[in-house]
Image (cartoon, rainbow, N blue to C red):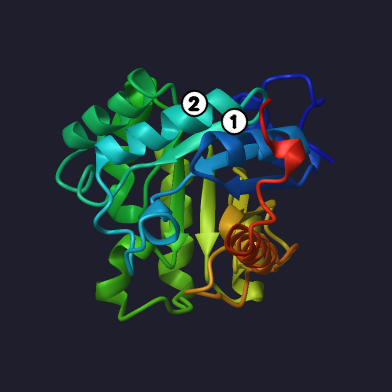
């Protein structure tokens, strides 16, 4: 079930209170108008405009090259397609780590210029001042702990995180700083359950087991549109990549043999 009725705009307080209501939250990461509109009409509770756009749209091996201006552009596209889903946007690498003041400025641009409902940033304990500063400026913040992709080189790759003490401290720090939810990425299922039980804000799992308060998947992963990286946690609900390739092959064949355009595709 969705957190609210399909016709009603989901707000940050409603999203946060889903945990107390026992309502699981469905989140999808999307980057443009079409994917946003499809996800919104399908009933997702939240659309995350992820800096993973750098990988699945731009073709980079990591999300690190993505700029704030690019995130603003993609957020504008997503906002045009979202009617009821909460739209949360990633702060990209090195747009918030320098200082809390930098975090507020970057987050403020996403809210003011792109129309985002909230922002997401990576890190727990070390990002507590930045989260708090954004909250004090009136900007809702979703945290992100566990495997944090912007630290991929420091972590030695996209690896499962198992340091329970650090993860518990990070998750608690997000809540203490005022975050309304926290993404938990790539941790063992039993640890995901412990983190979920340790806080009153919703945990949104991605490779963190079934006991989180919600789940998030990347649009391209769940539809089989991104062949370069196939994480274990990403269930494919369709194989649109193969379908698209087959359709384009048919188009090429018909253009070359002259069967397209046919009479019904021609003006008279």
Q: Nearer the viewer, residue 121 or 73?
A: 73
Task: Quarter of the image for the C terminus: give it.
Answer: top right
- Distance Cα–Cα, label 2 vs label 1: 6 Å
How far from the left and from the top, in percent, is residue 195?
58, 61
Residue 76 drawn above or below residue 239: above
Q: Nearer the viewer, residue 206 or 243?
A: 243
**Residue 117 has which mark?**
2
**Marks 2,1: beta carbons within 8 A:** yes
- The outermost residue toward the right is 1
Say which quadrant the N terminus sits in: top right
- Judging from the image, what secondary structure is the residue with disc 2 in? loop
Q: Is residue 164 above or below residue 14?
A: below
What residue did someone put label 1 on? 86
The outermost residue toward the front is: 268
Front-most of residues 215 and 246: 246
Residue 152 locus on image (x, y percent): 32, 71
- Residue 64 vs residue 89: left or right? left
Which residue: 72% across, 45% down? 262
């Amino acid at each position: 079930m969705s957190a609210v009725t399909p016709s009603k705009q989901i707000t940050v307080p409603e999203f946060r209170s889903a945990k107390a209501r026992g309502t699981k939250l469905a989140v999808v990461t999307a980057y443009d108008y079409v994917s946003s509109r499809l996800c919104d009409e399908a009933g997702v509770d939240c659309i995350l405009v992820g800096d993973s756009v750098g990988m699945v749209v731009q073709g980079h091996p990591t999300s690190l090259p993505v700029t704030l201006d690019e995130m603003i552009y993609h957020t504008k596209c997503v906002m045009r397609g979202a009617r009821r889903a909460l739209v949360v946007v990633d702060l990209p690498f090195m747009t918030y780590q320098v200082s809390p003041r930098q975090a507020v400025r970057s987050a403020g641009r996403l809210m003011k210029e792109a129309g985002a409902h909230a922002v997401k940033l990576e890190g727990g304990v070390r990002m507590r001042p930045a989260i708090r500063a954004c909250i004090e400026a009136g900007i809702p913040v979703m945290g992100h702990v566990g495997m944090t992709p912007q630290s991929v080189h420091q972590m030695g790759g996209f690896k499962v995180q198992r340091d329970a003490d650090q993860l518990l401290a990070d998750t608690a720090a997000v809540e203490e700083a005022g975050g309304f939810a926290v993404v938990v990425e790539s941790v063992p299922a039993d640890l995901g359950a412990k983190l979920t039980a340790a806080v009153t804000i919703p945990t949104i799992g991605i490779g963190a087991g079934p006991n989180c308060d919600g789940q998030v998947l990347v649009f391209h992963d769940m539809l089989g549109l991104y062949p370069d990286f196939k994480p274990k946690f990403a269930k494919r609900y369709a194989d649109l990549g193969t379908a698209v390739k087959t359709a384009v092959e048919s188009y090429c064949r018909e253009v070359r043999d002259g069967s397209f355009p046919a009479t019904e595709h021609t003006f008279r």
